[in-house]
Image (tube, rainbow, N blue to C red):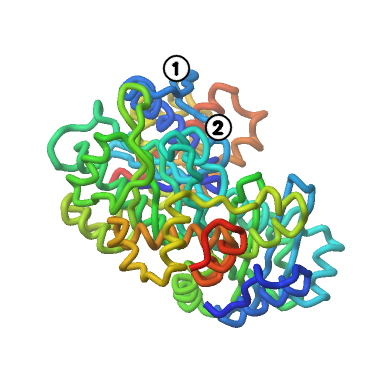
Amino acid sequence: MDIVDLGTLPKSEAVYSDFLLQVREKLEMDHAAYAGLNPAAGAIHGYVTYSDEWKLHYQEQGFHMIDPTLHMSQRSIAPVDWSRLERSSDFRRVFRDAHDFGIGDQGLTIPVRGPYGDVGLLSVTRECSTDEWHKLVRHTLGDLQSLAVHIHDTVMSSDMLGRVLYHPSLSTREAEILQWVAAGKSQQDIGDILSISHRTVEVHLRSSREKLCALTTAQAVGRAVGLGLIYPG
Amino acid sequence: MIIVIDALNKHLFDGVLDEMFRLRARVFGDRLGWDVTIEDGKEIDKFDHLDPVYVVGLDDEGSVVAAVRALQTTGPHMLADVFSDILCGEPPLRSSTMWESTRFCVDTQRLKRGKDRNSVSYATCELMIGSLEYARRAGISDIVTVIDPVMDRVLKRSDNAPYDYVGETVPMGKVPALAALLDTGEERVERVRRFAGIPHDVFLSDDDALALFSRARARAKPLAANADDVPATPLERYLAEQIQSATTVEELKAVHSLIDALAGSLAPSRRQNLLDTHKMVAREA
C-alpha cells in the first residue's frame, strides 16, 4: 500500500487530514473520518475529509455527543455497517442534517481498541448502490483494518504520555524474524530456518509492523534498528 | 444454528447469554477445574464486561449447546493478561487482523455422540464454521485461540488443525492450556464443512434466533394471558395475538412498547407474562 506512512512524518494535524484524503482516494470512498478517544489524556481527536461547513455544524450541534456511528460502533469489535444501527431519534437527527450537507447514511466504522482503554474509530462513506457498496467493503476491509490501527496508534502516541505507553515491545520470536528479514532472508527461508509455517512468519511480521507503527516490513526493520530492538543487517 | 451476539444486539438475547454463562460454569469451572469466578451458576469474567463478541450455537430445540468469545488483540485480551503464563512472559501478538478466541465450549451432557445433528461433533464443527466465517467477514485473517489439549485433538480430528502454536502448554486447573493459531481462509472452512457434512449457511438472523430461543422457553411456560384461572381480558388477548403474529424484531419491540404504555391497564403478573412470551407458534412451520 503506497499510502503515506504516518510514522515517518512530523506529527501535525495536517498530516492526519492528508492521510485520510489518501485513504479516501485509494479506497474509492466519498469520505473518511477518524475519531480517537483517549481516556488517559482526557482527549478526543478528530480528523475528517468532510467540508468545513459540516465540521462546524457538527460541533455546534454537539453531534459528537449523540452520533450513533461513534457511540454504538465503539462497543463493537467488528466493523459496523451503518445499516446495522437502529434508526433512533439520535441517528435521524444527525443524518437528517448530514443529508443537507450532502453526506449520506451508507457507511462503515472500523473500531480499534487500544491497550489502555483508548478507542479509535475510522469511518468511511460512499453513495452508491447497495451491491456496489457491499463489494467495495469486501475488497477494502482488510486494508481498512490496518489503516485504522495505523492512524489510531500514531495519534495516540503523539503526546508524551502516549509515547511512553505505546513504546513497542516485540516478543523474542518477532525480533528474531525481523532480524532474519534484516539479514535479507525471504519469508519462505525464515520459515525453513526456524522450522515454523510460513503463515506463522507472516502473522509475526504483521504484528511487528503494527507494533512499530509501520505499514511495510522495510519500514519496520528500519524502525526496529533505530530503537535498538534488532541489529542492522 | 449459530447466532452472533455483540453490544449492538445483546439487549435482545439476555436469556441466551445467561444460558451460555451457565454452560461456561459447567465446562470451565466443573469439568476443567479452571480458576474461574462463578456466581449464581454463571461464569462471568472481566473480559465479558468489555463488550466482546459471542458466537453461540443453538440446537434444534433452541437450547444453547456451544459458545465462544472473541476480542481484538489490539486491546485488552486474555493472553496479554490472565493467560500470560502461556507466553512465558513474552508480549503477545498484536494485529488489527487477528482476534483472540477464548471460552470455546460445547455442552457434552446435552448433546449425543456420533456425527448427526445435535451431536457433540456437529455442534463443535458448526461453531467452528460460524466463528471462522464471522471473523473472515469482519476482515480478520487469523485467530489465536486458547484451548485445552482435548480441544486441540478435536480441532485436528475435524480437519481443522491449527497451523501453529505460540508459547507453551502450561498447567491450568485439572488440564493444561495452550494457544493455537488458525487462519480464517475459505479452504479451512470448506474442510470442516466436508468433515461435518454441513453445506448450508449456519447463521440465524436475529429474528429467527429469537423465535427459536423463545419457543424453547415457551415450552417450559404456559401461554401468556391464559397462565392462571382468571379469564384473559380482550386487551390481553389482543396483545398476545399481536406478539404471536409479530414476524420481525421491530414488530415485537413495538408490541413491547405498547405493553409498557398500557402498564396501568394490566395486572403486573399478566404484564410480565406477556413480556416473557415471544412468538411461540408463529414459526412452528
**Residue at mark 1:** B229
Distance, label 2 to label 1, CA atoms, is 45 Å
Circle 1 residues within 10 Å: few <14, some 14–19, many ≥20: few
Please give the chain letter of the residue carrying mark 1. Answer: B
The answer to which of marks 2 and 1 sits earlier in the sequence is 2
- Identify the residue shown where x is 79% and y is 52%: A43
- Indicate the position of residue A191 as horizontal and vertical percent values: 31, 61
B14 or A210, which is in the foreground?
A210
- Identify the residue shown where x is 35% and y is 38%: B168
- Indicate the position of residue A205 as horizontal and vertical percent values: 45, 62
- Quarter residue A183 falls in: bottom left
**Residue type at mark 1?**
Asp
- Indicate the position of residue B38 as horizontal and vertical percent values: 46, 20
Q: Is residue A158 visible?
A: yes
**Residue at mark 2:** B46
**Residue type at mark 2?**
Lys
B173 or A228, which is in the foreground?
A228
A230 or B148, which is in the foreground?
A230
Between tags 2 and 1, which lies in front? 2
SS label for mark 1: loop
- Indicate the position of residue B76 as horizontal and vertical percent values: 56, 43
